[in-house]
Amino acid sequence: RAPSFEHHKQDALPLIEDSDKRVRLIVGEAYGKAAPVSTYSEMFYADAYLKAGAQLPLPDNHEDRGVYVLEGDVSIAGERFETGQMMVFRPTDAITLTAGKKGAHIMLLGGATLEGPRYIKWNFVASSMEKIDAAMEDWRKADWNNGSFLLPPDDQDEFIPAPD
């Protein structure tokens, strides 16, 4: 697919909340809601804040699911995970997170299993290092009008160079 960009204001992104948790769905479908962002495969990505002791089940309608702890800590089946840790779960496991004493800020993600290996370098993820190298070279050219990367209108002044 050709590169593209969409912007959706925060109010357009579904918010799932109750007295002890707030989950903002950014991409995909989860918890019976759907974000307006275009996707080309089954997935979800959500930002969640949990108060101390709050419990949050992971969506179970996605094959692969993971959680990254941004702040605080969570427990899963009696095991504690702290800031900077990421957990990836088997497809059919029912998972419920419990926030620690100070609460937690977590990132939830998941989707269909990707076939084959994936590579990551800086801000690029691809199925081969050759694709990543080509993308980095296009980024370095900074041709926002005709190149592979089209930045949002009025947001071309702050260029962050790719590392060597």
Image: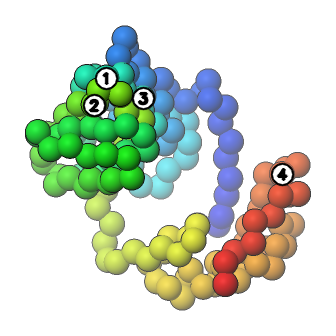
**Residue bearing mark 1:** 52
Q: Of label 1 and label 4, which has the lower sequence position?
A: 1
Q: Is residue 52 visible?
A: yes
Mark 1 or 4: in front is: 1
**Residue bearing mark 4:** 155
Mark 4 or 3: in front is: 3
Residues at badges 1 and 3 in contact (C-beta under 8 Å)?
no
Residues at badges 2 and 1 in contact (C-beta under 8 Å)?
yes
Callout 2 secondary element: strand
Residues at badges 1 and 4 in contact (C-beta under 8 Å)?
no
Q: Of label 4 and label 3, which has the lower sequence position?
A: 3
Residue 47 in the image, given as x and y percentages of width and height: 46, 37
Callout 1 secondary element: loop
Task: Specify the amino acid type for callout 3.
Answer: Tyr
Q: Could you tell me how many numbered marks the image carries?
A: 4
Q: Residues within 10 Å of mark 4 (few under 14, many from 20)?
A: few
- In-image side of 22 versus 6 (left or right): left
Q: Is residue 138 above or below residue 95?
A: below
Task: Specify the amino acid type for callout 2.
Answer: Gly
Q: Residue furthest top?
A: 19
